[in-house]
Each structure stands twice: as C-alpha cells, then as structure tokens.
C-alpha cells in the first residue's frame, strides 16, 4: 500500500516536472492524451453522482415509507388517540369521585375539588395541631 501511494506521488511529480519545468507538454495536450482519466478525475471519480443517486433513489424513499408508518401508527394512534383515551377515562373517573355533585363542575376538577385532593393535603396539617 505504501509502495502504490509513493509510486503515484512520484508519477505526479514527474508529470508536473515535464509539464511545468521542461515545458514539453501543455496541459491541453496532457488532457487530450488521457481524456477518459481526466474526465473521471475532473468529476471526482463520480462519487458525488453515486451519493446523490443513492440518497435520492434508495434512502429518501425508504425514509419516506418509514416516516409514513411511524406517523400513522405512533403519532396518530399512540399519541393523539392515546391522549384522548386518557382524558376521557380520567374525566369519567373524576365524574363519580365525589357524590356531592361538585365534580360535575369542570372548574372544580381543574382546581382539584373534584377528587377532593385538598382534604388529603390538609389532613396531615390538621392532625399535627
């Protein structure tokens, strides 16, 4: 591996010497002689083209399908529908938590009166006195 890289570097030095110091080749003549190699090197070995094709043809469509499934199953079913089920179940549970009728007022539920949590919090304070 070291020998190959050293050989390529030496070849580059020789070509640069011949083109720029000895001036026996012009860059246009060199391009004309190695047209295919020049075009491949000029386009960076077509790696960018391959990456662009790979992303546009394989990764983006696959990601789009995965996201469509995640959005329809996880976001729509679990988060949206799950939160509505929890809200309805909590409302039904709190509706009958206190038989005095104060739970039927939504304002009492928001303030904690529906579950009579105020009594539970004040009970230790009352017992200490």
Image: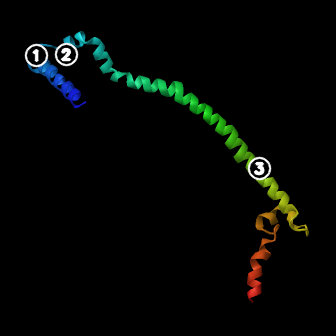
Which residue is labeled 2 in the image?
27
Taking the spot 77% from the left edge, 67% from the top edge, the residue there is 111
Q: CA distance from mark 3 to mark 2?
A: 72 Å
Q: Could you say whether the residue bearing mark 2 is in a helix, strand or loop?
A: helix
Seen in the picture, residue 85 relative to 18 is either above or below; the reply is below
Q: Are marks 3 and 1 in contact (CB under 8 Å)?
A: no
Taking the spot 21% from the left edge, 13% from the top edge, the residue there is 28
Which residue is labeled 1 in the image?
23
Task: Say whether disc 3 or disc 1 marks the residue closer to the N-terminus.
Answer: 1
Which quadrant would residue 36 be assigned to in this image?
top left
Measuring from the top left, give residue 8's x and y in whole percent: 21, 24
Task: Say whether disc 3 or disc 2 marks the residue closer to the N-terminus.
Answer: 2
Measuring from the top left, give residue 12's x and y in whole percent: 18, 23
Taking the spot 16% from the left edge, 14% from the top edge, the residue there is 26
Measuring from the top left, give residue 129's x and y in whole percent: 75, 89
Seen in the picture, residue 18 relative to 109 is either above or below; the reply is above
Taking the spot 74% from the left edge, 83% from the top edge, the residue there is 125
Which residue is labeled 3 in the image?
84
Q: CA distance from mark 2 to mark 1?
A: 10 Å
Query: Which residue is nearer to you in this view: 24 or 5?
Result: 5
């Amino acid at each position: 591996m070291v020998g190959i890289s050293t050989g390529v570097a030496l070849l580059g030095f020789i070509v640069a010497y011949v083109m720029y110091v000895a001036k026996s080749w012009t860059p246009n003549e060199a391009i004309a002689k190695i047209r295919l190699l020049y075009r491949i090197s000029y386009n960076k070995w077509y790696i960018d083209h391959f990456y662009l094709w790979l992303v546009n043809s394989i990764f983006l469509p696959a990601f789009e399908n995965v996201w469509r499934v995640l959005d329809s199953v996880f976001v729509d079913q679990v988060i949206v529908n799950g939160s509505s089920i929890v809200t309805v179940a909590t409302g039904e549970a709190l509706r009958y938590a206190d038989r005095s009728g104060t739970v039927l007022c939504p304002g009492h539920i928001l303030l904690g009166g529906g579950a009579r949590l105020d009594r539970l919090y004040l009970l230790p304070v009352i017992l200490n006195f």
